[in-house]
Amino acid sequence: MSFTVIAKALMMAKTRNAGVILPHPKASKATCEAVQICCKAGEDAGAPKGWLQCVENPTMQESNNIMKSDEIRMILSTGGPGVVRASYESGKPAIGVGSGNAPVLVDETADLELACGSIVVGKTFDNGMICAAEQSAVIVSEVYDELKKLLTNRGVFFVYGNDREKLANYIRKGNRVNPEAVGKPAIEIAKKAGISIETIPKGTVVLATEEDKHDIGEHFLMSHEKLCPVLSVFKSDDFMDGVDVCSRIVKNGGVGHTAGLYTSKDPSIAFQRETIFVKQVPVGRVFINTPTSLTAIGTAFNFQVDPSFTLGVGTLAGSSVSNNLGPMHLINLVTVARRQTHIEWFNLPNRIYFNRGCLEEALRDCSKAYSTGDRDERVLIVSGKTNKKLGNVHRVASCLREEGFEVEVFTDVHSDPDMACIRKGVEVCERFKPDLMVCIGGGSPLDAGKFIRAQYEHPELTLVDAATRFIELRKRVLPFPKLGTKIHRLVAIPTTSGTGSEVSPFTVITDDDGKKFPIASYKLTPDIAICDSTLCDTLPKSLIANAGIDAITHAIEAYVSVAQNDFTKMHALEALELLFGNLAESYQDGTIESRDAVHRGATLAGIAFSNSFLGICHSLAHKVGAEFHIPHGMTNAILLPHVIRYNSSENPTRMGIYPSYGSPVAHKRYAEIARRIGAVAPDSEGLIEKIIDIMHSLDIPTSFEQAGVPRERFMKSLDQIAVDAFDDQCTPANPRFPMVHELKDLLIQAYD
């Protein structure tokens, strides 16, 4: 008890707490003396007079009155179940601990000399008074006799017959430990139990009994806690049987406390057995190849256990803590947090090729050897039927074959790729075993290729896990696996000017039930992007218009995003200058110069939004497009003017949340865009006017009604679309955080 007093006194002194000690009646004299010594030492060091007090021989009523006193702020209860229960019923914050009944299992792979020495050291420390001391040893039958012999040689004396009965009846009185036996030497216990000490060898330090593994429970005295140098020894058939015996011992009065395992030092064996033991034995501490009593209180055997004489047993045994109690449990902490900007990064493909006619030169570079001298040899081309018909797939395949690559072509990608498409692509990969993947097409083949690669390299990756939400914009809840172990590089070649998928970490895959899953991870970013506008020379005008306005939306939303930064800002502005200056001409006249400028602008916009994300225009467009099958770019264009007006509020209902976004500045950023692209009015309205002008130039409708969406069906869908858009992963980056009813209002505004 004196150890406990000293430990508590040190905890209180370190944390500047005064305290009252309520001792057990059997230890009242020693406790009060220890309190006086500690109190004087504290006072000599500058503590207030009487900072530590002891109530000698308190009655239960006195203890209850003190615990309920207004002067008491917290209770540490280390007594029996009644005291612990009373502390919790006092109405004060309380931490109670529980009894231990620690078994140790010795399996057939253990170092028996180590196990023997550790068990004896642990059991004899403080004459077994520590609550975490070894109460029982469970030994696998294969090594039972050998370990028993070692224990006998180390001073463990086994008692049998009537002597065993005498010992059991002495150390346990009724259903409790006999206080007269607690902490007494083995010889003294034997003598008081009525065992003839002449039969006990000199040097005996522990008394032991052999018990049947089935004799565990309330009525079997030797299966309980003993708190003295007496050890129960059980034989188990094998390791798993031993685990079961330990579990039953713990459940007999030691739940949540301590258990030990002696097993192989080989990490591969030890880890497997530790895992099984920890899962099946309900304790808060498991100690491997080390004395449980000494390790539990934080001595030199292990540096991962905090020093303490007060050991929590967790909710399994009615305690609020399962770890060792220390000074930090007695401190009220004040958390001070300062606003900090995030550590950001700017992510790009390793190489981006651009300007007309760059395709062949870029593909030739793919044939070059790595620094190790190795090179890729087997290429899988991922594309769709359209690019196969247009000859783009043949153009790429021919160039790669000329460079010595073996080429396989997969052109079963359709619009909005689904898991059936992904599975087909993975099957091709498993058969062909490519080390390079080239994706050519619009957004769909590029999206499909990214996830085919991920599934091929990580078959265990599910679509649900891949699409797991973000804690915040740059922190996935579930880490995305590393790519590049089989397919060393992914090359993205866009044949449209708008998606930005060739430089983005995003992909969208549809599951087998038709639900779209947006996936975001910078590990999905292509390794190489080849932006050759000759591949866009035959694009239909509708695709030029819709892809181009999508790129404009990418750049605008990236520029006003809460995650906007200096690096994304310059790419977004340059993209907008190129797109506003050339998209109408590319659509109407199809000049080489305008097509090339739009192609570069779309990639720059992709770079911007890949690193600062998008906003609610895309959130709404994703849901409206899926419901009414309107082209994505057209949907964005119809919504964009209304979203700009909404975001331009200087007093929004709720501002977007991000450390680097300090106040509502979207209206200022829209004005910066307006000035850059030469709007008549250098503000949000001037930008909206420019957007509507270019929509007219591209023959894009300015409302959902003009786009042919039925009014009645649209109005019936509003509530669900608004809810789904609120839940879209683009929403958190919007500069104004929306309410669901505000999203609904935006949809209504965009209809007429």
Image (tube, rainbow, N blue to C red):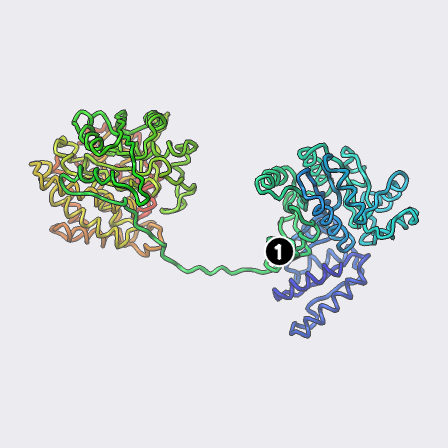
Q: Is 190 left or right of 146, judged from the image as shown?
A: right
Residue neighbourhood size for the residue with mark 1, other residues' Cα within 10 Å, grouped as few (<14), some (14–19), many (≥20): some
Residue 752 appears in view: no
Residue beneath disc 1: 306
Q: Secondary structure at mark 1?
A: loop
Which residue is the extreme one toward the front? 373
Whether 10 is drawn above or below 749: the answer is: below
Q: Residue at x 12, y 39 (%)?
A: 595
Q: Looking at the picture, tell me which residue is in the foreground, 83 or 381.
A: 381
In the rendered image, residue 611, in percent from the top left (x then y), is placed at: 29, 47
Identify whether 704 is placed above or below 668.
above
Left or right: 202, with 743 as reference point = right
For image coordinates 75% across by 45% down, the residue present is 135
Identify the residue at image location x=15%, y=52%. 676
**Quadrant housing the C terminus:** top left
Residue 593 image point, x, y percent: 9, 42
| Total marks in image | 1
